[in-house]
Image (cartoon, rainbow, N blue to C red):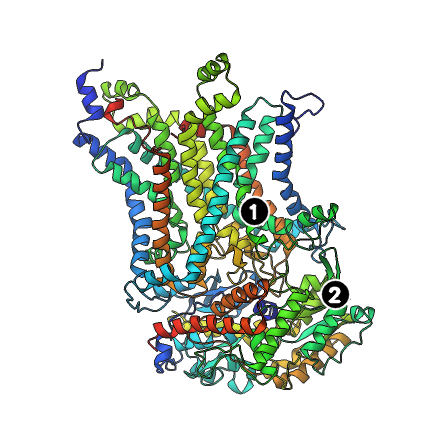
Amino acid sequence: MRPLSVRRRLLGGRGGSKGEALAFYGFLSPWIVGTAALTLYPVGYAVYLSFTGWDGISVFKPWVGLANYREVLTSPDTLSSLSKTLLLVAIVVPTTIIGSLVLAILLNERVRGRTVFRTMIYIPAIVPPVAASLIWKVVFDQDSGAANRFLAIFGVDAVSWLTGNHAFVVLIVVLLWAVGAGIIINLAALQTVPADQLEAVKLDGGGPLTAFRHVTLPAISPVLLFQTVLTTITTLQTFVPALLLSPIGAGNATGTYTNIPNANRVYMVDVYSQFFAYSRYGFGSAMLVVFFVVIVALTVVIFKLVGRSVFYAVDPTESRKG
Amino acid sequence: MQSSQAFSRRSVLKSTGFIAGAAALSACSGTSTASKASVQAAKNGTLTIMSVQGEITPAEVAAFEKAHPGLKIKQINSDPTRLNAMLAAGNPPDLVRDAGTDVTPYIAGRGIALNLDEYFAKSGILKPADILPINNCWKWDGTTQGKGARYGIAKDWSQDAMWWYNSDMWSAAGLTAPDPKTPITYDELFEAARKLTKTHGGKTSVYGLYATTPGMDQIAAMVATAGGRIMSEDLGTADFTSPEAIKALTWLVSTAKAKVGYSAINPSPDWDGPEYLAGKQAMAGAGYWFNGFLASTAPQYEDHTVFAAAPMLGSKRVSPSFGAVGYWIPAKSQNPGGAFEFMEWYCGGAGAHKRIAAGNGLPSMKSMLSIVPQETAFQKASFKVQTDELPYVTVVPVATPYAQTTALNTTLAKVFTAAVDGGKSVPALADSLTKEVNAVLANGKKLAGK
Amino acid sequence: MASIRLTRRPRHPVVFGVLLVISVLMVLPFAELILSSLRSANTVHEDTWLPSVFEWSNYKQVVTLIPFGRYARNSAVLATLFSILTTLSSAVVGYGFARLRGPGKNILFGLLISTMMVPQIVTLIPTYLLFAQFGLVGTYWPWVLWGIAGAPYAIFLYRQFFSSFPKELEEAAVIDGAGRIRIFVTIFLPLSRPLLVTAFVLAFNTVWGDFIAPNLLLDESNTTLAVGVSQGYVIQQGFQLSNLLAGGAMLYLVPVVVLFLAAQRSYVRGFVNSGLK
């Protein structure tokens, strides 16, 4: 047993001792100050703008009350972009989570060349979006892309990949290409699966599926939940690939809002075009505030559905664990 | 150094600097036009120029700084977010690159841009009497683009509804090459494009037509040749349901559906230049500046490339510019005198000389027309066509103080592709376009208190 | 690749086969980019598997048409600066969240998680206004400040990692009279080496890949490779050169791939250690 005084210094009373609280805030201070100035202030500014009809440059920011919010919630454009975004999430998130789990399990097998496979599968995840979108635009070009050349081998006619609903498929491909990020996290999680329990299942005559269901899955479920939340957040915010995949024809590689195919007008595309094509800074800000609420709500729903909070799973400063 | 045919067509870079708006507040109050700025002498120091990367070359920067020892150029990339932020912070760039045809009503009406009348009046280089009429698109009097004070000037320009064709491909397809100086009709152009297009297995190896987009510039220019217009007199509403507009939309929809050229529903992986040079397009939609592109990139194409007058939908010869890309000076520039010196140098002085002499577009100054290259047979022929076309330049109303042209083009592209993909009829498309574009304009007017 | 000896029978032929197919599919798109970068300006969109002519000289243009070296150096400086600061700062904050208690901790942790959900666009204009106010536009100071503020995701990883150690680790030091800072620096920081690498690589990739912030805050002379590559490959008339753009994008990728390969072991271990629970 430790001396009581040490326990006290380490754990303090409820909420910690004065000294510890001071240390706590000391350690957090860079982040607290930084977040206040570089995140909270801008967010507050956006919330303020959402009640105005600001056009982006006037000194005058006309107060419009809740008008922007009313429009966000009733505009068919917003609702359609929101539903496209939710469709994207519904496709990309499960595919990414299941795909990265399956691949991680395969890559966890003692297979020849495993390290090379891991690297090859992971590399797309570190490709910056500017380059990634460029690559896929080349691959999916209708008249000169590899995708259609491949189809031609089987006598299939060329598909116009970058337009209409096909563009949505390409967007999904680009997002799934980065599945490696999840694989690494899953691989890490798989290392924490208790080997003795897996062994026990085997001894009881259970197959690999039983072991997966009763040992592996429970052990890595917090990681899967964490990933689900993170992937959902990032997928909801999909913007750069949609912009960069748009046919630009001329000019720079950074794209233009004008030519983004309708199928890829997801929520953030809508927000960006409200800001930068339509100069509706107030309305765009209201869209963002609504979106933020949707993201938080979805996150909460995911937590409630899974029924367990990952983030509080381990906390040595909780006294029950001391 | 591009004038902006393809840019404008696809509305890519030309309005990147322009911020535009839903709410053209002061513009709509009628008292909009900023009063003339009295001329300020250039101050020594840094000139911040917002332009597209790679356009003002290091050599040009050095040449300018050598000629103006007190001034240093700092370049930042065109970016609407940044321009807005800079304006909001009260430290805008000293010069902003933009398309005069698109931005003038807004920047002038809002008082964001400096009224340059006094500067032009006193300029020894950009003398108003010497400025070609195309630069009227940089004028705004509070209600009409083309009248009133000057807010900027083109660095170079072209009549962007004009086009170029590969005469070898035309003869190979058994077609008689059209007379370059007599405008052909859009229907004839479509017919020819059909015969020039080659497809196989869902892929197209040759597109007969140049790339088209349902952009304001292109539609308004087509409609103007039939004597109509899209924007109302007060620039507050748009109408795509007039017989002329229906005719233009029908052409755009049919050519897109027939896949005789790249279009909004069949986008090009690149701009017309490389596609034309690769033999993938039998025509390139571009103004005079394409001459300089061929000279510097593929001179071997000159003997079978012909420059032709802008096609016509009806019987009125109109050949506008889709850009007149140049520079304007923000009202809050810290050094308007220095900025104007750059404008003089780059748009009418030594800085413009080399660009114009290389055939990259037409000069803003009448007196510089003489240095447009006329050495080779190709250059002579192109210049002849251009000279004949010159009288037909006009400001076709596209820009409005109530919304950014990009906003209108975004709406057009969205509605157009949805309609064509969804098999909507042209009249139905025209109705949706009118409704949607007017909603954008109405929103701008509402915020402006009109 | 050298380590795959196809002649020897893998222990799980099916798994091996599946992984082989997927791995190849994952990296094949790069081949398209490389091949595009070797085509000539006028045949860049030709419909062939291999270029009709291999224009190796494209790469010379790629590095000379824009000041490639300067932009690459700018990116490297900026990414390194930010990554070092944010790696350390996130460790400090993560330690605070993991091992210390204070009033409002749960609220602050909730705030940390919610900041991950804030889209970048929200911050663009006000951030510019803020930096303009202090004359920091056109400088690298914003990245210093962002670095010091820490990155939510990294802070979260550190918190998970530091939480996994037993109390005893600190107790002995506390008995010795060591302060919190000393405990952090001498005990926890050295333990977290793999995670430091992970956080560094993540941060480096973020800055290297970011186009929006440098475009908003830097000038043509001190901007990054992401901006330079995506906007710089244009002809005299202002139009994009697709083949050079592909080449530029290829070269732009190399540093992040090399960094990842070099750091791969520690990088993966960082995730293993954090446990992410």
The N terminus of chain A sits in image quarter: top left
Q: Amino acid at mark 1?
A: Ala
Q: Amino acid at mark 2?
A: Thr
For discs 2 and 1, the disc positioned in front in the rendered view:
2
Question: How far across and down, in percent of the image, does residue B283 sit?
Answer: 71, 69
Please state if A295 lies on the left or on the right of C264 as rendered: left
User: Which residue does the image show at 37% across and 52% down from the upper left?
Assistant: A291
Instruction: State the residue in front, B70 or C18.
Output: C18
User: How many neighbours does mark 2 have within 10 angstroms: few (below 14), some (14-19), or many (20 or more)?
Assistant: many
What's the mark number on residue B197? Answer: 2
User: Which residue does the image show at 73% across and 48% down from the upper left?
Assistant: A152
Question: How far across and down, in percent of the image, does residue B130 sit?
Answer: 55, 85
Distance from disc 2 to disc 1, alpha carbons, whole Å, reads 32 Å
Residue at numbered disc 1: A132
Instruction: State the residue in front, B205 or C136.
Output: B205
Q: Secondary structure at mark 1?
A: helix
What's the mark number on residue C113? Answer: none
Q: Tell me if residue A192 can be seen.
A: no
| Residue A54 found in image quarter | bottom left
Question: How far across and down, in percent of the image, does residue A138 sit?
Answer: 63, 51
